[in-house]
Each structure stands twice: as structure tokens, then as C-alpha cells.
Amino acid sequence: MRRRNLALVLGAVAGHSPLSRADVAGRVGLTRAAVSSLVDELIGRGALTEAAATASGRVGRPGRALAVSGEGPAGLGLEVGVTHLGACVVDLRGEPRVWRRVERSNADRPAGRVLAEVAELAAEAEADATALGLRVEGRVLAVPGVVPNGPGGLVERAPNLGWHAVRVADHWPDPDTVPEPENEANLGALAEFWSAEQPVETFVHVSAGTGIGAALVIGGRLFRGARGFAGELGHIPVHPDGPGCACGARGCLEQYAGETAVLRGAGLAHHGPGDAATLLAERAGAGHAPTLAALDRAGRALGLALTSAVDLIDPDGLVLGGAYAELAEWLLPSVRAELADRVTVRPWTPEALRPSALGRRGPLLGAALTTVRRILADPTLLPAG
């Protein structure tokens, strides 16, 4: 009961701060004495701060403003991408305080070497956080691969990295700081949900980089499937007799709407150094006909795959994240056209498909926010002061 009440008080302050203790009591329906005890504990755990007394306009002594702490507890998010590594520290208010990104080609490099470099980046980010008065309470690693349900920290497969059955702890130098791996698309979807002012409760989040990932949020909760393999939209066959895919199947969506496929279709397969999505956006914005045609084909393939998702789970919305968000200007018309042609058994509006406001920042933010959201749900995870 006390754990639930601590979360109730912390949630009230997080959602409506600044509040006085009396304000919190009015919102959560507990006595002022109970709220005062809970607030004192949350302050002791570093979750809340209390400012000097301020006049509230009410009769009586002025209240002291409570707010979620911008120092102390924080979450560390880490990311292994095919072309980069990343680290982010988010405070308990949900604000990013440290952000690091290193461009690095990770495809087919030994997993141990990649994870050793992520560990170095993590240590640097934690040092930055400590200098800001933050204390990392949890670590989550975003990976472009399948992470089965349950403990163990296993990345079952990440085809675009060349990883198979990689257990993160086996390659992490410090056993006390091993991060929990999670699929990047799942984390991007959660970041989208947690960051929205008016979140949609049921939606499909589709993101792209070298590969294509998807995540399902149903009723405000991430749907992982029976074994944690849900959301592999990139490997849904859109043309069963199409080209072979890195996953071993044929005709997968990635072969038509993945970054490599779009670059190839645009005549930019050997574009050299530089970000692929940025290059495609520049060429499309300049009216480069092959690029526009490639993006149109990608949008139609994506719309074909999303039709199945819409008919299967009846979502309120579809969100394009990752590189798709940056290419949405050219993808949205063809995706919407395909959905309009094929979604015929239920109501559907073009506005239900939109680009993510977070873009490629989503997975890393989601990784860091995972710890923050766990603390907000259970403040007893924090050490007592």
C-alpha cells in the first residue's frame, strides 16, 4: 500500500508540478498527514524537491512548492545502431541531460568489440551525469534485433549487425553496470507514447534505418508477443517471390522499403560517406526523379504491409519513426494512397498516419526513459535517504 501511495504522490507532482503538500492531498485523496509523510520519504529518496514557501492566494500559511527533482535519480539509455553508437541520460523529469552519438559502422563487427565500445561510451556519459549531480539508477540498451521475453539479456538475432545469440553480459566489462537489452523499435514506440501530450492508446510505430522495425502499443501497453518476437514488420513478405533477405526469407518489406533498397532504387547505392536519409531528402527536395520514384515505391510497399497491421489490430494510429520521419514528406502520399485502396473493412482516415516528432532520437530516449518510468511507478526502487 505504501509503495502504491508513494507512486500516487510522485505521479501527481510529476504531472502537475509545482504543487504544495496540501495541493497533492487534494489531488490524490489522502490526508495531509499521510501525504506529508510520503513527501518526506520521496525527498529522502531524491525523487522530489521542495522550494521556499510561496503565496497561494488561499487563507493560511503559504505552501512550499514540490517538484520532481532535476538532480539525483536518472536513467541511462544506450544504443547500438548499424551505423552509430549512442548514449543518453534522462533525469526524473524526463529531460535529456547528456547526449552522445558516435558514428561507427557496426555491421558484421564482433559483438564483443562493439559492446566494449558501448561500455566506454556509457562510462563517459555517466561521468558527465555525475558532474551534473545525477545518479544513474538503471541502464537499457537499444538494439536493432529480437530480444526474447524473460531475463537473461539475450539478443536472439540482429541480422543487420550479424549478431546471433549474443548475451550482453558475456561481453560487458563491468558486471555491475550491464544494461538490459531491448528492441529499438519497441523503445521508439514507448518514447512516442510517454512523450505525447495526448497519447494515442493503440498504435503501430514503424521505424527505419538499415532495417525496418515495428512496435505495437495496445491499450497503452507495449505488446511483445508470447516470446518477445512481435513487431517484425520488416520481414513480412510483400512479394513472396521477391529478392532474398538477410533474414533468410524472400520478398521481405526491407527489400523494398529499407534504406539499402531505396538507395539502390534511387541510383545512390554507392553514395559514399554521409547519412543516407539526409542524402535522400536532399535529392528528393531537389526533384531528383529516380529518388522520388524510389520513395514512391517504398511508400507503396510500406502501405501494403501496414494494411495487414491495420486490419489485424484495429489501431487508432500509425506512426512513422526513425529515418521514415525525415522522409515523411515523400513517403506519406504513397503510403496513404495504398491504405486508402486496401483498408476497406473498417473506418480509416489519412490523418491517422503521421510522422514521429522524435524521429531517430526515439529509441535512445525510450531506453533512458524506461528507468525513469519504472521509478515513477515504484519509487521504492530508489535507495532510502
Image (cartoon, grey):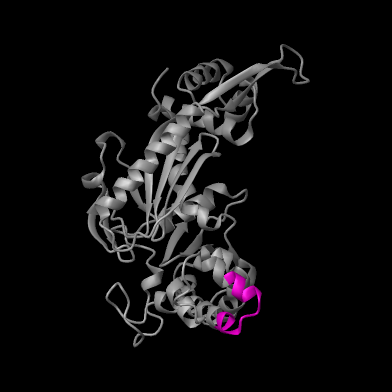
Residue occupying image coordinates x 40% and y 27%: 380
Residue occupying image coordinates x 58% and y 79%: 334
Q: Is residue 93 magenta?
A: no
Q: Position of residue 307 (x, y in %)?
A: 49, 76
Q: Nearer the viewer, residue 12 or 262?
A: 262
Residue occupying image coordinates x 56% and y 19%: 31
In this view, which residue lies farthest toward the bottom? 241
Q: Nearer the viewer, residue 268 or 134?
A: 268
Tell me the quadrant of the picture where the N terminus can be found: top left
Q: Is residue 264 above or below residue 312?
A: below
Magenta extent: 281-293
Residue occupying image coordinates x 57% and y 34%: 14
Name the magenta segment's main secondary structure. Answer: helix
In this view, which residue lies farthest toward the right? 57
Q: Position of residue 182 (x, y in %)?
A: 36, 52
Q: Nearer the viewer, residue 55 or 146?
A: 146
Q: Is residue 334 above or below residue 114?
A: below
